[in-house]
Image (tube, helix red, strand yellow):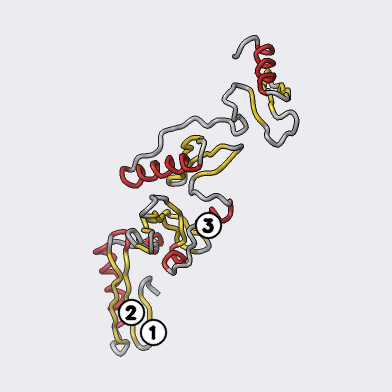
Amino acid sequence: MMRGVSHRDKWWTAQYQNLRNGIPKQIAYFPDSDPNSEKLAQAQRKKWEEEFGTPSSSNRRKNYAGYKKGDFIVLGDTGKTEQKQQIVLVQNVHTDEIFEVPIQRFRMGRWTGKTIREGRTNNKTVGVSMSNGRWSAGITIEGRYYHLGVFESSSEGAKAYNNALHNWLTNGERPKPVDVPRATNTTGEKYIQYRPKRKGTPWLFEKITGGNRITRYFHDFHDAIQFRDKYLGGIN
């Protein structure tokens, strides 16, 4: 049977919808008492396709941009699906915070203010995660991840994420490359790292030379720096 053409209760039905081209759902009915009703339904469907184009499966995603619920408004579709639900971007109109939300839960008022991702990672801000006492921000655009920097607070990371998202949605501008620091280096001193879970000797000097990893642990930060300077004969 031709796509978009069906038979039920003595009627042949032709249907068409193309959200990508802004064409809402079209329906035409033909009684099967007419021996040509099936062909007429097929002809109508073919006519719509010739006029508006052949719709693809991606057209099944609805555009909820502008839909409001309480203090939130839908900005647009993320292109993602989670648990068979279309995921949209929702903004708090008072705080400008942005979330990824399953649309069905949002429309039914069952969304509690957290995203599916937040529920799994226990983070409270989209695009921001904590590592070794600092906050890292990043955003994924069309399948590519962009690192936005490391920050002292969650709010600073959230601001970087919201700015990147705003620039993409309004101007199509992608984030500029940002150097990704080593996740374990939180001291700002070259080759010196801090391991808070290591009791007694949390300060670490680490350097790879000729394929060999040189490591030394210290009680005091200044001892680690002195060893580094002595070992290297100055910072290299």
Q: Which residue corresponds to mark 3?
A: 116
Q: Nearer the viewer, mark 1 or mark 3?
A: 3
Amino acid type for the residue under numbered disc 1 = Arg
Give the residue furthest to the right. Answer: 200
Q: Is residue 138 left or right of residue 36?
A: right
Q: Residues within 10 Å of mark 3 (few under 14, many from 20)?
A: some
Is residue 150 shown above or below 68? above
Q: Which residue corresponds to mark 2?
A: 13
Q: Position of residue 36 (x, y in %)?
A: 29, 83
Q: Which residue corresponds to mark 1?
A: 8
**Hey, which quadrant is residue 107 in on the image?**
bottom left
Amino acid type for the residue under numbered disc 2 = Thr
Q: Position of residue 44 (x, y in %)?
A: 27, 73
**Hey, which quadrant is residue 159 in on the image?**
top left
The answer to whether the residue labelled 2 contacts the one labelled 1, judged by CB atoms less than 8 Å apart, is yes
Q: Position of residue 29 (x, y in %)?
A: 29, 81
User: Mark 2 and mark 1: span between their CA atoms?
Assistant: 8 Å
Q: Earlier in the sequence, mark 1 or mark 3?
A: 1
Q: At 74% across and 28% down in the image, what residue appears?
A: 201
